[in-house]
Every structure is written in structure tokens, then in C-alpha cells.
Image: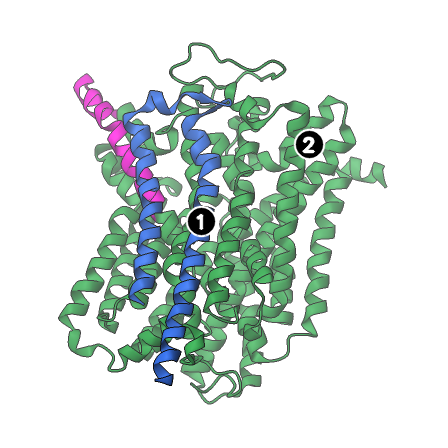
Amino acid sequence: MRDQLKLSIACALCFAVALVALPLLNYYQPAFMAQRVFGFTLTWLILGVLFFPFVWIISFVFIKRSIALEDAEAQAAKDGLIK
Amino acid sequence: MNALFAAAGIDPWIAICSLVTVVITVGMGFWTAGKSKSAGDFFVAGRSVSVGWNASAISGEYLSAASFMGVAGMVMLNGYDALWYPVCYACGYLFLLLFIAGPLRRFGAYTIPDFAEGRYDSPVFRKIAVCFVLFIGFFYTMPQMKGAGTTLAYIFPGLHYSVGVIVVGAVITLNVSLGGMKGITLVQAFQYWLKVFAITVPIFVLASLVGHYQQHLQANKTAQETVAAAPAGIERKALTPKAPKDEQWIAPFGSLTTKAVDTAIKAAKTPEEKAALEANKKPYSLLYTYSLIIALVCGTAGLPHILVRFYTNPDGVAAKRTTMWVMILIGVFYVFPPVYGVIGRSLMPELYEAIGSKGTDKVVLELPTLLAGRDHPVLGSVLSGITCAGAFAAFMSTFSGLLVSMSSALAHDIYGRMLKPDSSPEQRLKAFKWAAVIIGVVSVGLGTQVEKLNINYLVGQAFAIAAASYFPLLFMSVWWRGMTMKGAATGMLVGGLLALGSIFLTTLSDVYAVQSLADLWVAHPLARILCEQPAIWAVPLSIILMIVVSKATASTIPADVRMKMLVLHAPEALGLKQEYIKEHEGLGGH
């Protein structure tokens, strides 16, 4: 359970940093964030398009690790019973 | 036939597409009715919904009228700031996945009030939780009903608003009482794919004919650019007087987040006052943005009608996998509504002149008709018909999910647990059907009263209340052993009620034009922002209260808390799984 919580918090922090940072960048670096990238402004491209795949990556990593942790825990408990 | 339609001012394609959606929905309802037999089927679809089906169904339920029509309208109206809505609607699921989905499923309850009671061994807590389920549910139902009423009135000009509310309410109530959770799972999954089809296909066709997303965005000049550099081939209609200026629209901290301060500046008398307010404008709008983000992200993780769906998974791992797929499915969807808003701004600026459902909110339905003026009359009608069908799917699927979760609360928690604990599964099944009818009638009644309210605004309020009540409850109960019932109840009630109260104040001043409140907002724009977006203070307040009160009442921590934590977190393979509600004992035993 503790490892699971650690994993969850690590993933959540990753996500929270992005959520906190984007408005701050908009606030302190408006000109930089307003530059054009493929016709979008940089900040529009990040929020309107790139944010979705970013979150998918976090969730994919989480699922893989989380299920591996559960399997390891189940295995450890089984071994414990046999002994 | 065509002449008949034309005489009534109805586009035959739009009418046919909408009708087909409704007929398929009813048809699927009858088809699945024969398959739903046990009480378990009705409440949690027999806990046997596969990851793919469940992910589609949750996505179908989640993408409501606000997502389908509202987001595009908001982006058109408010520009960049409104992009936070689709992004946080989709990304809020991450919190659900990281902290809540797996453990909640492992607990094996039927409803969230089950969890509340089971975790703290407290029947009182169940009652509190039921009230919140019904409350958040009705809050969320009203905008769906409004969407139904306005869309039907759009398709059949001249039809009264309440007709749409009654028709959709009746169709869904019939469906839910026929098939329960199992019945609507299939319908919602179908409706998800219909919605994705309906939002993507018309926009791809449109974009290929009138110019792409980024090209239309480029036609709006930023504060740094002196002239708008519209790419070749992109034409743009002149903006109407009420449309926001380019540089405000495309940049962060635009009209949505600075409205409170702008109103105050308008009312300010001396230049010094104006200058002081002007200096505060940007920091305040940053605060508004953060509060909005917290409300949407935490609120998603606390919506009872979404949470209840995780119980339909076979186990905790499946619940986690489902959440990941839901994020992908709804993420794919949410990329597109802003495209309608952006293209709408370029080509249909006349929508800015009307308000709400007569204005920007109908951009998704109206935009495809552009093609009629460009030598593609039939194509324009067909595409508009497709988006109308998508809108129908949107409010029908969300309403059916809400109806199931509220009917479960009535039939399972109130009837089955409080009024008649010794009732048989058959009796509870019957109670579910009656509950669906009662809730359906109440929802229609409420729906006819909210014609003037803004869809997104209502949904945003439901999110803020859920963020300040259910999210802290679930998050803390799942991960902290030291929580007591008193701590949980205090935090949830105080956080939820204060959020509700402050939102109510803003509604009071906006809808009923209470002058003394309006004066207060002008004098203190910060107070207005904190009342309109309460999450930034209400969520931490709720969590702090939970911790403080739990510490103070530490002697009442449930004695078997270790076992409870094990059930919540141990993998199924360990064999510790205990369904809180056991199928073979009917609904009664645990």
C-alpha cells in the first residue's frame, strides 16, 4: 500500500507541476507563450493539444507500474504462506 | 414531404438524424430489458462489464450537453481561458485513476453511500452521503434538461422549450426503468461512439472546405503582432460589436477571468481607484484560473454518478485499466469542440450578438450550415443533422447515468437500507423502477424551470460542490487510517455547504439582479471571484477540517480499520476480497 501511494503521489506531482506551471508561464512570460507554432500560439498548442497525450503517458506509466506492484505484493504474500 | 418540412421551417436531415438517435436509444433499451434480471444487473450491471465496454460507457455518460455544445460555445466566447474546461474535464480523470478508482472498486459496495457507511460503520453517514448524491445529481441534471429543451426547439422552430425536456425525460426514464445499469451500459457505449463520430466528421469536412484549426487561429492577432497574418485562402467575417477583441481572446487572462475586476473598473469613480484595480487585474485572474482548475480536476474525481460506474468492473485492476481508457477516449473527443469555437469565431461572428443557447452555445449545431451558402446545401444539412444527433446522444446518455445513480440512492440506500432493511431483492428491484420514475418526473419538473440559466455555469457549479465535498471524503477515507466518521462528515458538510452557499450568492446576484450583492461585488471584486470559484479555499478547508476533527475524535476510529484498509488496497490475488454487498445473498447481507 505504501509503495502504491508513493507511485500515485509521484504521478500526481508530475501532473500538478504541469498544471501549476502553465498559468505561471502565461503570467510571467506572455510574449514567449504567445509566439506562433504551426499557426497556434505556443500556449494554445500546449493546452489545447499537447496536454492530452501528456496525461495519457502519465496514466500509462502508472497502470504498468501499479499492476506490477500488485503482482509483486501478491507473489510475496504467497511465498510467505508457503514458508 | 419536403415541402411540408420546408413550410414548417424544419430541415429534414436534421429531423431524421435526431429521430434515428432517439429511436435507436429506445430500441436498445427494450432489447437489453430482457437481459437485465437480477437486482445486481440493475444496480451494478452484474459487476461483469468488460474494460472496453465500461470505458466507452463511462465516456458516453461523461460527455454531456455541456461538453458537446457548451465547450465550443465557451471557447468561441472566452477564447483561451475556456480551454481549461475541456482539458480539466479530461485530465481530472487522472486523479480518479491515481487515488480512487482501484480501492473504491475493491471495497465492493453498490453506491457511494454504501462506501460511506461501510468505511465508518455509521448509518448516519449513509444518510448524509445520500443527500449529497441526490443534490449533486439534480444540479447536474438541470443543464442536461436545458440542453434537451433548447436543441429540440432549435430543430423544430416554434416548438416550446418544455416539449424537449418532457420528451427526453420520458425516453430516458423508460430506458432506465426497463434495463437499469446493465441496460444503459450498452446504450451509453453506443452513444459515446456516436458523439465522437458526430463531433469529428463534420469538423473534418468543414475544415477541408473552409480552412483548418490552426489557420483560423492564426487569423486572430496576438498582442505582439501588429496585423493579423491570416494564411492565404482563409477568409474571415468582420467581428460584431459584442465580440471580444483578438488579442484578449487568444491570450490567457481574458474576459472570463477578468470579468469581476472589469465590472469594478467600470463602476470606479476616481482615476486612482481605476489604476489600483487595473494593477490587481492580472493577479486576480491568475487566482481565478487556479481555482477553476482545482474545481474541475477535483470535481471530476468526486462526481457520484461517474464513481458508481467503477463498481461495474469485475475487479480493481480492471477499474484502473478502465480509467486509463476513459482518459484516452474522452481526451480524443475534447480536442475537437474548441475547433468549432475557433472556426465559428472566424465565420459566424453574428452569434456573438445573442446570448446563451440562441448565441454562441449553438455554434456546434449551426456551423455546418455554412456549407449551404457555399454550394453544398445537402452536405451542410447532413452534417448539421449529424451534430444534432450527437447533441441528443450527449444529454440522453448523461441523464441516463444520473438517473441510475439517483435511483440507486433512493431504492438501495433509502428504501433498501433505511426504510425496509429486510426487503427481498425483488422488492428492491421494483423499488428501483419506481425510484427511476419519481426521479425522472422531478427532473423534468426542474428542467422546465431553468431555461434562462447557462449550461456550463450550472455544470461548473456541480463540479465545485463535488470537489469540496465528495473528493476530500473519498481521497482521505481511502488513504488515511486515522479518519473518523465525525471528521469525514464535518469536512464534507462544511466544505460542500460553504461552496454551495457562495455559488448561490453569485447566482442570486446574476439571475435575480440583487442590487446590494452587485454593489458588494463592485466594491470587492476579489470576493466575487472567490464566491464564483470557491474551490481554491473550499477544498483545502474541507481537508483540513477532516484532519483536525479526526485527530480530536481519534478514539472513535473504527476498530477494524486495518482490515478495511487491507480490503481497499490488497490485490484480489491475495484472496482478501470481500464484496461489501454479496451477490448470492441478494442485496441484504454483508
Chain shown blue: that is A
x, y percent for residue B147: 56, 47
Q: Residue A77 carries which label?
A: none
Q: Is residue B64 magenta?
A: no
> For the residues carrying marks 2 and 1, which lies nearer the camera in this image?
2
**Residue at mark 1:** B459
Q: What element carries label 2?
A: helix
Disc 2 to disc 1: CB gap under 8 Å: no
Q: Position of residue B362 (x, y in %)?
A: 58, 36
Say which quarter of the image contains residue B545. Answer: bottom left
Q: Dot 1 surroundings within 10 Å: few (below 14), some, or many (20 or more)?
A: many
Q: Pointer 2: residues within 10 angstroms few (<14), some, or many (20+)?
A: some
**Residue denoted by label 2:** B205
Residue range highlighted in magenta: B267-294
Tell which chain the image draws in green.
Answer: B
Disc on the earlier residue, 2 or 1: 2
